[in-house]
Image (cartoon, rainbow, N blue to C red):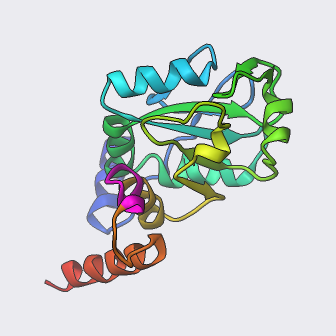
Amino acid sequence: MKRVFASVLVMIGLALPVAAAEIGDDGLHKESWMRETFLDLGEDIEEARAEGKRLALMVEQRGCIYCKKMHEEVYPDETISNYIEENFFVVQLNLHGSREMVDFDGDVRPEREMLRKWGMLFTPTVIFLPEEVAEGQTAPQAAVATMPGAFQKGTTLDMYTWVNEKRYAMDNDEDFQRYHARRIQERAAEKEE
């Protein structure tokens, strides 16, 4: 009976609700493409580079409605989740966590203290790192881009793509906002065809 109901919903253009994202013991949403590491950012960036991926730090907190929105509405999209999994080494950080972490400058603190030092106030926030970090820099100082907050699917995919393609380093006038505006127009044109 469920299969028939699901088929009817698909035929009339309604999607079944997305299953709730898995929640870990820490109260944070978990994705298959997130990495469990020792939170030594120097080691994490080396491992990401060895896999041909970019390091992204995803800061979240228990009970965050915007984190929930991203994990239930945006990340389940196969295009987005596949792109992230193929191109990024994602390490999740807990805004109120107590796990010890090591920043690129060698500073060792619990997550909550490190994130406070970095000035993190809102979740979700994704910090995108370059392939190499200069000695003595912290993660926020080295970041090539930061995605603060919950965004729609197109904006999220465009940000990950913009970072992965190193468009931030290109000698042109297409910053992220212009790139995103162009991608919106291109997607609209594709729908019209």
Residue most extreme to the top: 38
In which quadrant of the rendered image does the C terminus lie? Answer: bottom left
Q: Residue at x 47, y 59 (%)?
A: 156
Residue most extreme to the front: 135
Occupied quadrant, residue 59: top right
Q: Residue at x 32, y 41 (%)?
A: 82
Relative side of 143 to 103, left or right: left
Range drawn in magenta: 162-169
Residue 34 in view of the camera: yes
Occupied quadrant, residue 106: top right
Q: Position of residue 100 (x, y in %)?
A: 76, 17
Q: Is residue 85 above or below residue 149?
A: above
Relative side of 27 to 171, left or right: right
Asked if the magenta segment contains residue 166, the reply would be yes
Q: Residue at x 78, y 27 (%)?
A: 111
Examine the residues drawn in magenta and state their main secondary structure.
helix
